[in-house]
Amino acid sequence: MKKARSQKGSLCLSVNGSGTQVWIFRWWETSTDGRRVRRKRQVGTLDQYKTEEAAEKAVRNWRLVLRANQDGAVSRITMKALIDHFREKELVDKGEDGRAWSTRDRYEAYLNSWIEPRWGKEELTAIRAPLVEEWLRNIRQRPRKRKRPQLVETERESKPLAPASKAKIRNLMSVLFNHAIRWGFADRNPISGPNKGAGVRQSSKRVRVPDILEVSEMQAIVAKLQLRERVLLFLVMVTGLRRGELSGIQWGDIDFENLLIDVRRSVVDQVVGRCKTEASQKPVPIDEFTAQDLLAWYRVTPYREPADWVFASNSRRAGKNRGKQPLWLQTVMRYHIEPVIRELDINKRVSWHTFRRTYTSLLHANGEDVKVVQELLRHGSAKVTLDVYAQAQMPAKRKAQHKVVEMVRPEARQEALAMAT
């Protein structure tokens, strides 16, 4: 019998009653009366786990739980072991009770690119707030994967990582330590600290203020687009739908009679999932003009069944999946909308989210109640609506400024009165 012992529990290759070779995990457990009891559990067959290393990976989380019940065991748990446990328990599809696919995908990206390579071998007790803070201060953008190796690093690749990205890495590390505390693998969270200011300090300040479009610019862009792209832009301009929600609309979600769109799903990287938050699933109102645009598109698209995507991919490259998948909206932006923006000499960085931000700013400029704006954007908090999305446009700022000028400069007030008469 082959046997491999560890600090807590042991893994052995044995034979069951039917003569099949199986991996068995054994450990000692203390009962309520203080007696030591030998326990065992079958891991799987030799066909399932062909090597001892594969079987060890299968019992890694069991060892983690057992060690957490030992005095001083926390000092032997590494960040990699914690990440593996977090993946098994949290980064799995739990339906409505779990995290959205887009969130899980983003977490995996940060874990694979940043956290695990730097902190994977470190024991949890060795990770301190100042060390993480210094690391975040110095990390830089990762080089892009290229078909041909580049001998010289480009200027873009040598830039420091954006503060917002660093803040997300910091927040994910805090989530990991909270997970460790919940499962008894740690008794503290060095990232958040015991009180305000004691943890890792990392600003999320933007490198640059996001651009928003003027009404005239949006009108000029739409005027040069074909029907499909024109309907897409009009729809996002007057609803503020997120890109994934825009991709996920099916004809059965649109109530033309009551002028509503039920936001039931979000499509990110062609993966269909639930919406970002509970608030995101609220119906979105549309106007009669947008409804007419959608009907005009309905008459020409070959995909008109209730379960068909409103903006289905009709590319020949899709083969058997033609019409069964939504459009890649980033491709639509790159090949159909960005060329028009360049042609019009609009020197702004425009993405699908730009239209959502512009929609917010226009609502704010029109003096709409903040609660109405929050509900239209389906935000969980009005603070996010005002602090992150809304921007005052230049005409509104000039108008507000001129009111003050009239108050402090008599000549300006006299000129305004003369113009009024």
Image (tube, rainbow, N blue to C red):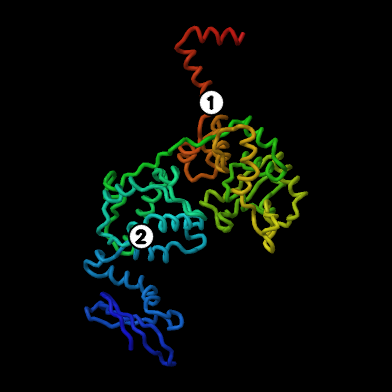
Work out whether 345 lies above or below 56: above
Q: Residue furthest front?
A: 151
Disc 1 marks which residue? 394
Q: Amino acid at mark 1?
A: Met
Q: Residue at x 53, y 48 (%)?
A: 279
Question: At which x and y percent is residue 206?
Answer: 43, 39
In-image side of 274 versus 82 (left or right) = right
Quadrant of the rendering where the C terminus is positioned? top right
Quadrant of the rendering where the N terminus is positioned? bottom left
In this rendering, the count of numbered labels is: 2
SS of the residue under disc 1: helix
Residue 193 or residue 145, whichever sits in front = 145
Mark 2–mark 1 contact, CB under 8 Å?
Answer: no
Residue 221 or residue 306, whichever sits in front = 221
Work out whether 148 lies above or below 375: below
Question: At which x and y percent is residue 227?
Answer: 72, 43
How many residues crowd around disc 1 within 10 Å: few (fewer than 14), some, or many (20 or more)?
Answer: few
Q: Quadrant of residue 258?
A: top right
Residue depth check, mark 2 versus mark 1: number of the one nearer the observer: 1
Disc 2 marks which residue? 179
Q: Residue furthest right?
A: 299
SS of the residue under disc 2: helix
